[in-house]
Amino acid sequence: DTKKYPHKNHPAKYNRLGKDDIEYVTFTHHERVKLGNELYDTIPLTSNIDEAERRKNKGISRVFPKVFVGKRSALGKENNKYNLTKEDNCKVNNLFKTLPRENVPYTTNSNKKNNKKR
């Protein structure tokens, strides 16, 4: 799950780019999502990333249309609550290759470090 950016506590899928460098996409249930002053249309998957919600037909998950690049500390600890279907996994892997990228403005929980970056 994301710690702060682009939204707090959203599920994320990430790829390692280096020892501590990652790229990640985030998931939501909303068709449109606001980030800063911009409104974005999200990309629908075929299924829900939460298996419990998938079994109850609780709707599909959607991908925020950007790849975020930052440090592993931008995300919380690993969890196994979410997983993609094979079809959605292929789709998300292709999105990593095609979506625009944005650097994460901060990647730590430390207020001292965050204040230095501002």
Image (tube, rainbow, N blue to C red):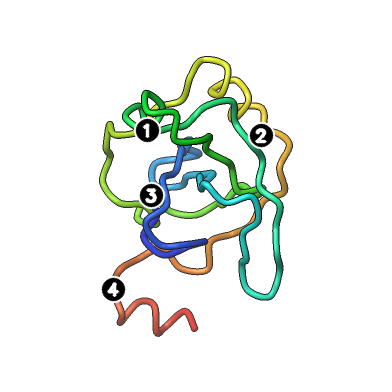
Q: Quadrant of residue 54?
A: top left
* Residue where numbered disc 1 is placed: 53
Q: Which amino acid, mark 1?
A: Glu
Q: Position of residue 98 (x, y in %)?
A: 73, 36
Q: Which amino acid, mark 2?
A: Leu
Disc 1 crowd, CA 10 A, few/some/many (<14, 14-19, 20+): some
Q: Residue at x 47, y 79 (%)?
A: 117
Horizontal side of residue 6 vs 43, given as left or right: left
**Mark 3 vs mark 2: which is more N-terminal?**
3
Q: Are marks 3 and 4 in contact (CB under 8 Å)?
A: no
Residues under labels 2 and 4: Cα distance?
31 Å
Q: Are marks 1 and 3 in contact (CB under 8 Å)?
A: no
Disc 2 crowd, CA 10 A, few/some/many (<14, 14-19, 20+): some
**Mark 3 vs mark 4: which is more N-terminal?**
3
**Mark 1 vs mark 3: which is more N-terminal?**
1
Residues under labels 3 and 2: Cα distance?
20 Å
* Residue where numbered disc 3 is placed: 72
**Mark 1 vs mark 4: which is more N-terminal?**
1
Horizontal side of residue 2 vs 87, given as left or right: left
Q: Position of residue 25 (x, y in %)?
A: 54, 44
Disc 3 crowd, CA 10 A, few/some/many (<14, 14-19, 20+): many
Q: Which amino acid, mark 4?
A: Ser
Q: Which amino acid, mark 3?
A: Arg
Q: Position of residue 109 (x, y in %)?
A: 30, 68
Q: Nearer the viewer, residue 44 or 17?
A: 44
* Residue where numbered disc 4 is placed: 110
* Residue where numbered disc 2 is placed: 95
Q: Residue at x 47, y 62 (%)?
A: 7
Numbered circle sitting on residue 19: none
Q: Is residue 42 above or below residue 86?
A: below
